[in-house]
Image (tube, rainbow, N blue to C red):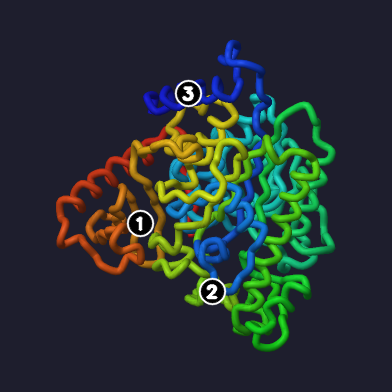
Amino acid sequence: MRRAGIWAVAACAVLSIAAGGPGARNAGPRQPRPNIVLIVADDLGYGDLSSYGHRVLKTPSIDRLATEGLRFTSYYAASPLCSPSRAAMMTGRTPFRTGIETWIPPAADVQLGRREITIATLLARSGYQTFLSGKWHLNGGLDNARQAQPQDHGFPHWLAFHGWAIPHHRDPTNFFRDGVAVGEIKGFAAQIVVDEAMGWLDRRQKDAPFFLYVAFAEPHSTIANPDRFNAMYSAYTDGTPDPMANADVPPGNIAARGPGEYYANVAHMDYQAGRLLEHLDTLGLRENTVVVFTSDNGPVTTDWRQWYEVNLYGSTGNLRGRKGDLYDGGIRVPAIVRWPGHTAAGRATDAPAIGYDLLPTLAAIAGVPVPADRAIDGEDLSAVLSGTPFERRRPLYWEFDDSHGFHFAIRDGRWKLLADEAFGRARLFDLDADRFEIVDRAAADPAVVKRLLAQLRDRHADVMSDPLRPPKTGGR
């Protein structure tokens, strides 16, 4: 742990010199530290953008971001569900270290505890202004004073909702502003989130860099769209759009009307993301702002498992599995980074990366050391962003009770292994030859299975012995 922390501090110091940080006294004029905008979609699949191969959906704003930046083709969420994935993005730590093992239901006694250090906290301590607009889902409720809230994790001001928009994306009633319930807000969730983000950009202090976290509700269920977006995809809708409301019991209007409304939901999110990007341009912030776009986990496909998933038609790009699975369909997600002057426009990379890489990477970009007093599982991807050679020090690692009876997954280069909690049942896939995880290579390559199982056991033991891991963790 200590070695990893020292390595990361050294890497950050080098990047700080390159960026005009404290060590760059003889390196020419000091350059301002870059602003950072992190945009996270909710349940957006690997194949849900036209820049990732969707044949119907048009997502021009995010596609333009890809043509102007770097597109990852082997980027993974740290969990196939939202709360643990977001905990990993915020902390740089695999989510079981934080005690967030699955999604957090309302009123649950689970939280991202105050001992965890988020990227927002790191940046705020170093002089960045920070703001959250959108989904939090890292505790049991934004009105729970006993649990850590966004202001305890680096966001002194925020507008957020717990886990999903209620009753659906139109006129939501469950937003909180700085801990105070707002009540119904007229409009649609994505528009509300972007309006708030743009307003904050306008009123922020202009003499300090900023970190803006924009977390959409879309396309998580239950969906609702402006009429003009529904009309764009009406050819794919059977009947009249009729949003289902979140409720304790299934509503009476559950119907499978085809993918048109789902397509409209993604298209509306893309439009609102475009508004935000255009506002950055209008304010003259484009050239010194790093924009990261990604998703928290894989999509709900037509393999519906809950009533509130009916009428969702997410695409994994034909990868196996879906949200809730450790197969790639549940965890491989789109990721795009635009950093003018640093990321070459229109390039793609197949370098394996994961959500817990965000903290060390963004910290390095800002010239801020990562915490040296705890295990940081993520790795600095600055080399990938600049197009220089990069080799991971440790394989990608997942722990989650998925819907197929697996609990662990590990990816080391071309190899990916799935295993149950007892390390007894295992499946091995060669992703270079079999990206759809069809052919189980466990019997043909027992030495690889043995090696990866040993690595899984070591990583699991390290996570379980983490001194910051809460004694109680959340169940399903």
Q: Amino acid at mark 3?
A: Val
Q: Which residue is mark 3?
A: 9
- Distance from label 2 to label 3 (Cα)? 45 Å
Q: Nearer the viewer, mark 3 or mark 1?
A: 3
| Residue 386 horizontal/vertical position (percent) | 50, 37
Q: Between residues 354 and 107, which one lies in front from this camera angle?
A: 354
Q: Can you give x and y, in whole percent of width and height, for residue 304 in the image? A: 51, 76
288 on left or right of 296: right
Residue at mark 2 to residue at mark 1: CA–CA distance: 21 Å
| Residue annotated with mark 1 | 407
Quarter containing the N terminus? top left
Q: Residue at x 25, y 59 (%)?
A: 428
Q: Secondary structure at mark 3?
A: helix
Answer above or below: position of 126 versus 72: above
Q: Which residue is mark 2?
A: 306
Within-10-Å neighbours for mark 2: few <14, some 14–19, many 20+: few
> Is residue 222 found left or right of 281 in the rendered image?
left
Q: Earlier in the sequence, mark 2 or mark 3?
A: 3
Amino acid bearing label 1: His
Q: Earlier in the sequence, mark 2 or mark 1?
A: 2
Q: Residue 415, which numbered label?
A: none
Q: Nearer the viewer, residue 115 or 314?
A: 314
Check whether the beta carbons of the residues at disc 2 and disc 1 lie within 8 A of each other: no
> In the image, 454: left or right of 34?
left
Whether residue 231 can be seen here:
yes
